[in-house]
Image: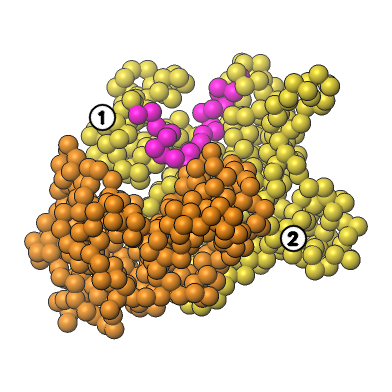
């Protein structure tokens, strides 16, 4: 049984301007010890998907239908109380985007890190302090840092603290939402190395959300590409990067400037992602797709298998096969 | 391109920001301490090229860009710029003297910069912050024309606005002109920012991280637009970025900055393929690439620790506390790196490096 199974999840935002279908009929599974990367442009619904899994969708958004089964429990059916005491942080934790803002400026590192330990694990302050020291060492920080306030730390140090915080209760699943986006390249490389090492030592399940496919390549076993609230392609990392099937994935990969090899002209995707209040009929990528056919503008393509664990929602692959 | 003549010569430019003194320091008449944001850099920019400043946050790359436009006060050094004949005459009318057609931006009074502003423009990183939300696109683009007295009637100005919008491929211009920034996408906003920069026919445009806030899928679109504008309007760019991979696609030459100093300058390909300075090597090694085999190995980034504060710059070579090469050859280098600042010297034609390993 997979650790996490999301089925036909729909998370909509009910705004005055209309219903924004941020996550629209998304299904995915995550095995134990697996790293799943979710990539897509801003506004494609990848963060909303993460919030849904934690039961943290902010109003006016809510989960409309579908199920999120985590280790046999349907999260969508739990009350806020149950979510808090049983699931959130203890079993599923999150590394939030922008470490600068994820820490409370008025608490020291020790206070912030020991809080979940005291509340969830019932540790005494002294026990918690020892555990905090262990956590800080684990993420490559000196334990003396625990007496400091967030403003006394550098960006990289803060991000390490945030990672330590997510791992504090030894959760089964960690959701990392743009964990390195605000960091400099050198620090980013160090944080990615840290995440790799932690993953090698202890196999956890990780959902890594980012717009940067290069970062996904560094960590993920499997990749899901999201576009306008839907997953358009999903498959093993090696397949997605070397043999992408969906035109969106292909263009995204060609748009990344590379450091090595010949300088080819970078591709770009003309136009902008659709307004999720009134998504276009048929395939949502059709208005920007260079290969769009009549059928694309009328009917929505189903996810079909194109290889080992490799699924694509595109009429092109369906016609060809 | 480097066969062209220089349009800008920066020599020993320093931009220091004074730190606020405590009451104790004031009473004790302690000297003012400074943040050495830019600490003595020199480079030339040739006409028609794209010159790149690369570095991590806090290295002084943005401050350099602003100093060239005289948007920050320059502590010392010179920023010599060669304006057109017409602008030179205007400058002279303002009482600004020139030397064989060159003016020193560092010495011009900020109030007398106006004639030069037409030739020197800037595009900022954040297209959400750099456009006035209460201005329609038309108002944004018309303002510089009014300030510089270009186009006498509203109709004439509108013609120029339409032309600029067409140049940045915002079509149909009549429709775009009436929109407010919130009605535009990120990519479109950045195009408006470029239209605003080029509407006065500038010669040198400083672009400060113009694509880093944009989605990958539209980055290439803006980079291509920059290339086109460069060709059609004969622009020279100073491109500021933290991303070497992006720099490789648009720049002719790259200068790498660290803590207010230029540590290496070279032709773009050469700098990335054969970096000489240990810091450049670390930067190149740190860039992630979309290759799934990277997952199997740790990325080796040959650098120690983190960037120190620009208010407390290490003595000698400011990179030495983080330098792996210094660590390895401490015995041999102990009288150099921690003591003397390495000069920027040409080690190969067009390849400059400031490192005691490459004397």
The secondary structure type at the circle numbered 1 is loop
Chain B: what color?
Answer: yellow
The secondary structure type at the circle numbered 2 is loop
Q: How many marks?
A: 2
Q: For this rendering, which residue is in front, B274 or B32? A: B32
Image quarter for residue A252?
Answer: bottom left
Q: For this rendering, which residue is in front, B75 or A53? A: A53
Give residue A203's mark.
none
Q: Is residue B246 visible?
A: no
Q: Which residue is mark 1?
A: B178
Among the chains, which one is orange?
Answer: A
Determine if the magenta segment contains residue B126.
Answer: yes
Q: Pinpoint residue B333: horizontal percent, then vertical percent.
A: 87, 62
Q: Which residue appears at 48% of the width and 69% of the height?
A: A218
Type of colouring: by chain
Do the residues under discs 2 and 1 have CB atoms within 8 angstroms?
A: no
Q: Chain of mark 1?
A: B
Q: Pinpoint residue A163: horizontal percent, then vertical percent.
A: 50, 58
- Gap between marks 2 and 1 measured at Cα: 54 Å
Horizontal side of B8 relative to A276 (left or right) equals: right
Q: Which residues are magenta?
A: B112-133
Q: Chain of mark 2?
A: B
Give residue B323's mark.
2
């Amino acid at each position: 049984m997979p650790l996490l199974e999301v089925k036909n999840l729909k998370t909509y935002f009910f705004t005055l301007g209309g219903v924004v279908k941020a996550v629209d009929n998304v299904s995915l599974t995550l095995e134990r010890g697996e790293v799943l990367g979710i990539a897509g442009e801003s506004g494609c619904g990848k963060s909303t998907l993460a919030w849904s899994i934690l039961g943290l969708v902010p109003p006016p958004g809510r989960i409309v239908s579908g199920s999120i089964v985590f280790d046999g429990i349907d999260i969508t059916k739990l009350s806020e109380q149950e979510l808090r005491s049983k699931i959130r942080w203890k079993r599923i934790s999150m590394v939030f985007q922008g470490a600068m803002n994820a820490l409370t400026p008025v608490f020291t590192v020790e206070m912030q890190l020991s809080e979940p330990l005291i509340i969830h694990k019932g540790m005494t302050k002294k026990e918690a302090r020892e555990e905090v020291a262990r956590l800080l060492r684990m993420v490559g920080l000196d334990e003396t840092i625990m007496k400091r306030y967030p403003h006394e730390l550098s960006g990289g140090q803060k991000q390490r603290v945030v990672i330590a915080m997510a791992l504090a209760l030894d959760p089964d699943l960690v959701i990392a939402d743009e964990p390195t986006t605000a960091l400099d390249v050198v620090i980013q490389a160090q944080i990615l190395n840290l995440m790799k090492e932690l993953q090698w030592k202890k196999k956890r399940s990780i959902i890594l959300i980012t717009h940067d496919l290069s970062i996904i390549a560094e960590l993920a076993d499997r990749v899901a590409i999201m576009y306008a609230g839907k997953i358009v392609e999903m498959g093993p990392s090696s397949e997605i990067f070397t043999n992408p099937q969906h035109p969106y994935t292909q263009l995204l990969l060609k748009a990344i400037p590379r450091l090595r090899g010949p300088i080819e002209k970078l591709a770009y995707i003309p136009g902008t992602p659709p307004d999720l209040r009134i998504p276009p009929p048929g395939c949502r990528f059709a208005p920007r797709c260079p290969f769009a056919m009549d059928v694309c503008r009328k009917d929505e393509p189903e996810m079909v298998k194109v290889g080992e664990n490799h699924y694509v929602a595109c009429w092109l692959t369906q016609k060809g096969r | 391109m480097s066969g062209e003549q220089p349009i800008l010569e920066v020599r020993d430019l320093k931009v220091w920001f004074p730190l606020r003194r405590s009451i104790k320091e004031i009473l004790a008449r302690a000297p003012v301490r400074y943040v050495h944001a830019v600490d003595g850099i020199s480079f030339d920019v040739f006409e028609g090229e794209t010159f790149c400043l690369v570095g991590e946050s806090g290295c002084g790359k943005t401050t350099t860009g602003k100093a060239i436009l005289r948007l920050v006060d320059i502590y010392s050094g010179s920023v010599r710029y060669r304006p057109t004949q017409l602008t030179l005459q205007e400058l002279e009318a303002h009482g600004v003297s020139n030397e064989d057609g060159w003016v020193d931006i560092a010495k011009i009074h900020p109030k007398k910069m106006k004639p030069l502003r037409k030739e020197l423009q800037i595009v900022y990183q954040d297209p959400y912050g750099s456009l006035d939300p209460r201005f329609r696109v038309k108002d944004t683009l018309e303002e510089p024309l009014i300030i510089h007295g270009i186009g006498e009637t509203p109709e004439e100005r509108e013609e120029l606005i339409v032309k600029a919008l067409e140049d940045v491929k915002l079509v149909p211009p009549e429709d775009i002109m009436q929109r407010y920034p919130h009605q535009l996408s990120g990519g479109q906003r950045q195009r408006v920012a470029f239209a605003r920069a080029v509407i006065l026919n500038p010669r040198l445009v400083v672009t400060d991280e113009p694509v880093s806030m944009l989605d990958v899928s539209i980055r290439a679109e803006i980079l291509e637009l920059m290339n086109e504008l460069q060709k059609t309007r004969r622009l020279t760019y100073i491109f500021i970025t933290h991303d070497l991979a992006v720099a490789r696609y648009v720049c002719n030459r790259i200068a790498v900055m660290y803590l207010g100093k230029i540590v290496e300058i070279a032709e773009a390909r050469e700098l990335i393929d054969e970096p000489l300075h240990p810091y450049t090597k670390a930067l190149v090694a740190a860039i992630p690439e979309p290759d799934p085999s990277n997952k199997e190995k740790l990325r080796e980034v040959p650098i120690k620790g983190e960037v120190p504060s620009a208010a407390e710059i290490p003595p000698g070579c400011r990179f030495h506390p983080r330098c792996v090469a210094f660590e390895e050859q401490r015995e041999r280098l102990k009288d150099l790196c921690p003591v003397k600042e390495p000069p920027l010297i040409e080690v190969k034609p067009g390849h400059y490096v400031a490192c005691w390993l490459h004397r």
